Amino acid sequence: MKKFLIIMGSPREDGICSELIKQVSAYFVDCEIKVYDTYKMSPAPCTDCKYCEYHDGCSNKDLDIFFEDFEDADYIAFFTPVYNNFFPAPLKAVIDRFQRYYSARFKRGAKPPIKKPKRVGVVISAGSNARQAGDYMTTTLRQSFTVLNGEVCARYYILNTDTGKYTFNLVELQKIVRQLREE
């Protein structure tokens, strides 16, 4: 059975990202789905302690189970709002903790540092028309996943949520699912 890892970057349990997780998950009923809420995870920040340059893993053990699921996933999807033109702090802390894989690759020579390839999607909601910020966020993930044995192959923007002038576009939703599941 394929594994689908959802990374929730919003603090709102009943917000737009949560609704989109429900909508997207419906297309992955044939997969084992795990959802990680970065606000509930409360990840410690990377402090560049250098532990991962010499050892597998991280000196902070708070994300060990998450990273086991991360490495084992076939599909990964990030669901996040835009905060000050970037990811919210808890999600950014998780992304910073990818350092363990960059060190594995570039300091310890692991090629690739994650064995199982992944298809990755990004779903971004923004209070304004923050497409440029969304593009930058997506580019950041694309760059990260070049080392993490993954391909960011799908993205979906929901813009202008602060005004209430947004819609859930079923065509775009199905497009991200198709792009994510394409094999």
Image (spheres, rainbow, N blue to C red):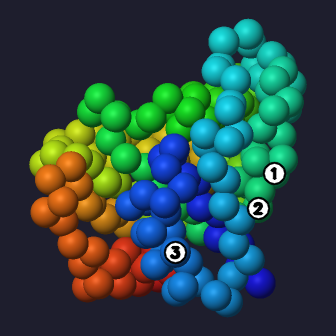
Which is more N-terminal, label 2 or label 3?
3
Task: Please rate how many residues cluster around mark 3, counting C-alpha atoms within 10 Å: few if below 14, some from 14 to 19, many from 20.
Answer: few
Q: Which amino acid does label 1 sit on?
A: Glu
Determine whether, in the image, residue 122 is placed left or right of residue 59: left
In which quadrant of the rendered image does the N terminus lie?
bottom right
- Kindly identify the residue that appears in the image at 59 percent across and 68 percent down: 75
> In the structure shown, which secondary structural element does the residue marked by tag 2 occupy?
helix
Q: Give the residue at mark 1.
A: 68
| Image coordinates for residue 123, horizontal then vertical, percent | 38, 60
| Front position in the image: 70 or 148 | 70
Could you tell me how far apart the alpha carbons at marks 2 and 1 are, in whole angstroms? Answer: 6 Å
Could you tell me how far apart the alpha carbons at marks 3 and 2 are, in whole angstroms? Answer: 22 Å
For the residues labelled 2 and 1, say whether their Cβ atoms are less than 8 Å apart. yes
| Image coordinates for residue 103, horizontal then vertical, percent | 68, 26
| Front position in the image: 63 or 88 | 88
| Front position in the image: 177 or 168 | 168
> In the structure shown, which secondary structural element does the residue marked by tag 1 occupy?
helix
| Image coordinates for residue 178, horizontal then vertical, percent | 41, 83
Tag in front: 3 or 2: 3
- Kindly identify the residue that appears in the image at 26 percent across and 61 percent down: 158
| Front position in the image: 39 or 118 | 39
Q: Give the residue at mark 3.
A: 22
> In the structure shown, which secondary structural element does the residue marked by tag 3 occupy?
helix
Question: Looking at the image, how many numbered discs can be counted on the residues?
Answer: 3
Tag in front: 3 or 1: 3
Which is more N-terminal, label 1 or label 3?
3
